[in-house]
Amino acid sequence: MKNKKTAKIITGVLIFLAVCIIAGFVVGDIFGKKAEKSETFGIAMGTVVSTKLFSYGDASSQCNDINKLIGELENEISWREENSAVSLLNKNSSVACDEKLKDIFDKASEVSALSSGAFDITVGKLTTLWNIGEENARVPSDKEIKEALKYVDYSGVKTENGKISLKKGQFVDLGAVGKGLACDRVREYLKNTDVKGAVISVGGSVLLYGNAERKKPWTVAVRDPRGESGDYMGVLTLQECCISTSGDYERILEKDGKTYHHIIDPKTGYPSDSGLISVTVVSDSGFLSDALSTACFVLGEEEGKKLLEKYNAEGVFIKNDLSVSVTNGLSDKFSITSDKYTVSGE
Ligand code: AMP
Ligand code: MG
């Protein structure tokens, strides 16, 4: 089991290196010799965290600070951490909250409402039933799914009088926003340092930081959802922002010749089937890029694009016929680099 885990982690690091290497070279060019470069790889939130900094200060200790603060966020919001605020909430249907935690839940409720419930953090009863990506993953019976669905309803989440509360039996899973939130927390930290540029990757979410001194935008690869680990299908050229990808290849369960992925449609209780295999969202906010990529994945291209408009966010949508479409704001910032993919409608 330990070997399996280590192999998974090493694979993760290799994927990251292959996918983000383009960004790395660009950064080196721009910040020149004066800035100290430091790079670390860690594991948090069940994924690889890669921190690449260009700093006029002590970059290696800044990398450590970043790994530490992502670990602290995980301890606060992961339902897997026994004493996290979210675990206490799930256990007692209520937990005291500070403004930061309240803000996370309020923003999540807003995305739920605007996506007509395609994004719903109370999906936890279902995600823990399927457990996709874990050793004990399984295909639940229709009856179990029907029972779990009774507890999936974002309107049951309330944030009042310094408390978050749920309807009895509901279970919150912040897995769809944790990595984007980590990007936001890292950016807050970086603003008070002498770091001049940074590329922080937490699983499927990436923070590009350091516009002020850069003359060129960043270049980021978009993973090929039907390729080998490390393959990419296109590149985005972007200024400082957050980018999150949701894909059907990230966590899977194969059973009786069928493949199930980890993004659940809260209306059916089954892995979503919107015709999309990957959605990448670009936003100023890490939380929103992450929440919206999950929401769009469930909603499908048409409704997903409408949702992105409401948040002034942009996206790359890859359909199961390997056609690709982007929102208007990315039309001159995204290019396909793999022959397998075509521009939608051409
Ligand atoms: P992401 O990879 O960001 O799209 O997030 C997927 C994770 O979010 C899953 O592993 C679940 O923990 C959780 N999740 C699955 N389906 C949903 C959903 N419809 N709304 C909110 N969270 C979800
Ligand atoms: Mg997400």
Image (cartoon, rainbow, N blue to C red):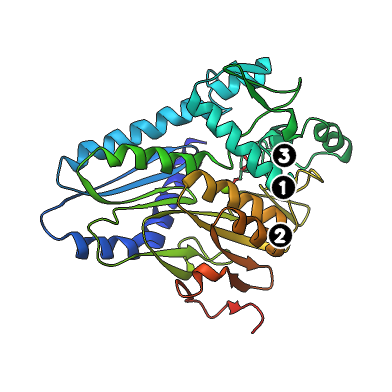
Location of residue 123 in the rendering, given as x and y in whole percent from the top left corner: 71, 37
Q: Which residue is mark 1?
A: 118
Residue appearing at x 29%, y 41% in the figure: 190
* Label 2 secondary element: helix
Location of residue 129 in the rendering, given as x and y in whole percent from the top left corner: 73, 34
Distance from disc 3 to disc 1, alpha carbons, whole Å, reads: 18 Å
| Res. 174 visible in picture | no
Distance from disc 1 to disc 2, alpha carbons, whole Å, reads: 10 Å
Establish if 221 lies above or below 260: below
Amino acid of disc 3: Trp
Q: Which residue is mark 2?
A: 303
**Residue 108 falls in which quadrant of the image?**
top right
Q: Nearer the viewer, mark 1 or mark 2?
A: 2
Q: Is tag 1's residue or tag 2's residue first in the polypeptide sequence?
A: 1
* Label 3 secondary element: helix
Check whether the beta carbons of the residues at disc 1 and disc 2 lie within 8 A of each other: yes
- Tell me if 325 is positioned left or right of 210 in this view: right
Q: Which residue is mark 3?
A: 130
Q: Is tag 3's residue or tag 2's residue first in the polypeptide sequence?
A: 3
